[in-house]
Amino acid sequence: MIKVLVAEDMHIVRGALVALLRLEPDIEVVAEVASGLEILPAARSAAAEVAIIDIDLPDKDGLTAAGELHEQLPECRTLILTSLGRPGTLRRALDAKVSGFLLKDAPPDKLANAVRGVVAGRRMVDGDLALAAWDSVDCPLTARELDVLRITSEGYGTVEVAARLYLSAGTVRNYLTTVVAKLGARNRVDAIRVARESGWL
């Protein structure tokens, strides 16, 4: 039996995923969690072989949690399940060393097959999305510029962003000016929109 953990914060969606997986004769759901913070401890205690992780989770996003699993519990494969079918999001997932990336609107049988595939050591990625990612433009922002933009997108002002990143307020303003210019945006809000639509945030 393949031991699976399901991480999804929407109760109805999580219940549906668990019900689907329980129909499979070779898959056992050993843990269910609703928060990114719960993934690593639950995977460890349940000896999960595959963690199916929603990308948008409270407390800690799915990609961060997947990266932690890869580092601290490498025997547990990660399968990202998301409605965000953007090439940039797939690239971020692959950077986090996920084993698979599946869209939520995929046919139900694809989920079980993806679980079996990642356990067998294969990387399971939606074909159309993989082609789109291949053709997509790389993110022009540096890691630090992305950090500044990500925290700004959470509603923090310049001084708060500076404090969180141990920078001066002037340096944060300079980063944001550079980000706006690199993305060809009108202002910070527009830069956040461009980055989100491209899957870079």
Image (cartoon, rainbow, N blue to C red):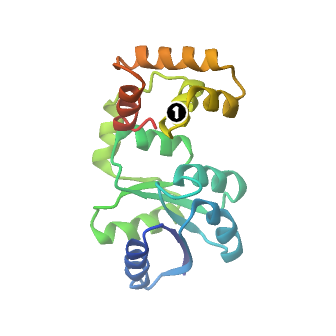
- Horizontally, residue 178 falls left or right of residue 41, namely left
Q: Is 156 displayed left or right of 110 in the figure? A: right
Q: In this view, does 160 lie above or below 187?
A: below
- Would you identify the image quadrant in which residue 135 lies? top left
Query: In the depicted view, which residue is nearer to us: 111 or 123?
Result: 111
Residue sitting at 38 percent across and 57 percent down? 102
Q: Residue at x 63, y 16 (%)?
A: 171
Amino acid carrying label 1: it is Thr
Quarter holding the N terminus? bottom right
Q: Where is residue 92 in the image (x, y as percent from the top left)?
A: 49, 40
Near-viewer residue (35 or 151): 151
Residue bearing the label numbered 1: 152
Residue 127, horizontal then vertical, whole percent: 31, 49
| Residue 98 visible in this rendered orientation of the protein | no
- For the residue pair 115 and 193, the one nearer the viewer reads as 193
Residue positioned 27% across, 46% down in the render: 128
